[in-house]
Image (spheres, rainbow, N blue to C red):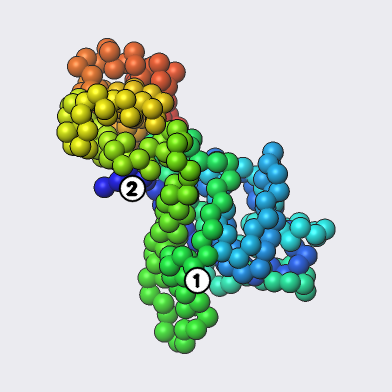
Amino acid sequence: MDALSEVLRLAHFHAAVTLDATAHAPWCVTVPASQSLARAYVVVSGRCLLQAAGAEPMRLGAGDFAMLGQGPAHLLGSGEDAPAVTLASVQRTSVAGEMLPVRLGGAGDATRLILLTAGCERHLAQPLLSALPPILRVDMAGAAPLEWLTDALSLVLSASDVPFLGAAATRARLAEIVVVEALARHVQSLPPGGKGWLAGLNDRFVGRALALVHGRPSEAWTVDKLGRQVGLSRSALAERFGEVMGEPIFAFLTRWRLQLAADALLGTTRSIRAIARDAGYESAGAFSVAFRRAFGKPPSVWRAKARRKAR
């Protein structure tokens, strides 16, 4: 499995369709900030203006996908003066799995847009999230996943008396596929010679090493062992990884193992010693020192604080 898929899997990535709207100019929707959800818009037809806090306005046209990965507050509209309405006021709760389309705005030019929301365990998705721009914009015109999604939404309107069984689950899976397709297109569009995690995905050898490290983090990796797996000598892999990623292999592996350990402390009842062993530490004491350096508190305090929040 590739590194992008591994990170999304381990971070429990999920997505959903939360709005299918046709907006007629003039119109404007205000969207509040969210610490847990990323929001993405797909413009099926027409055009609109996206204005996020602290960013330049972005004009979107048919086929554009725009995702705000960090969940900032923002406005979406026709770009003309229009009374703003809240996102909550235009969203409709689906009934028996059916998501009915929404109409808003005035009587001018029409724009059809689909709102997707995506969530994950953010600390586990950090390699990806920290590498993305504040607003990820991708041309999705003609992309098969987008056509599948719009077709699935159209079934609600074309169906007769027979309900579309599994509609909500289908929309969710298609929403995930659209987001993954957009991420893949963004990575593949990056110019050569870049640095960092996304550039590593595009590199034949570094990408393989990242996939192995993400997919089998508790394995007793050595640079020599990784090199044999990806088809490079120990020295060649170490040099190439450092050049593309900007850090040594084991600095990256250590940080990833600690992120997985943090998740295990929150989501399991396994002992700190067992979690330390999976993270590559022979003693709980050494693990505690490294964990505190990375997360600002020792493993026991990290776990106890999470349990108090859950009560």
> Can you identify the residue that label 2 sits on?
5
- Left or right, 287 with reference to 307: left
Residue 198 vertical placement versus 60 (above, below): above
Q: How many other residues sit within 10 Å of disc 2, few (<14), some (14-19) or many (≥20)? A: some
Q: Residue furthest right?
A: 81
- Left or right, 242 with reference to 152: left
SS for callout 2: helix
Q: CA distance from mark 1 to mark 2?
A: 24 Å
Q: Are marks 1 and 2 in contact (CB under 8 Å)?
A: no
The residue nearer to you, when weighing 22 against 265, is 22
Task: Using the rendered view, name the quadrant where residue 243 is placed.
Answer: top left
Task: Using the rendered view, name the quadrant where residue 127 is placed.
Answer: top left
Q: Which residue type does callout 1 highlight?
A: Thr
In the rendered view of the protein, which quadrant contains the C terminus?
top left
SS for callout 1: helix
For the point 71% across and 48% down, the residue is: 57
Q: Can you give x and y, in whole percent of width and height, for residue 234 in the image?
A: 21, 26
Q: Residue furthest bottom?
A: 160
Q: Which residue type does callout 2 highlight?
A: Ser
Q: Can you give x and y, in whole percent of width and height, for residue 257 in the image?
A: 30, 28
> Can you identify the residue that label 1 sits on?
150
For the point 74% across and 72% down, the residue is: 109
Q: How many other residues sit within 10 Å of disc 1, few (<14), some (14-19) or many (≥20)? A: some
For the point 22% across and 33% down, the residue is: 232
Q: Can you give x and y, in whole percent of width and height, for residue 215 in the image?
A: 26, 39
Question: Residue 290: which numbered mark, if any?
Answer: none
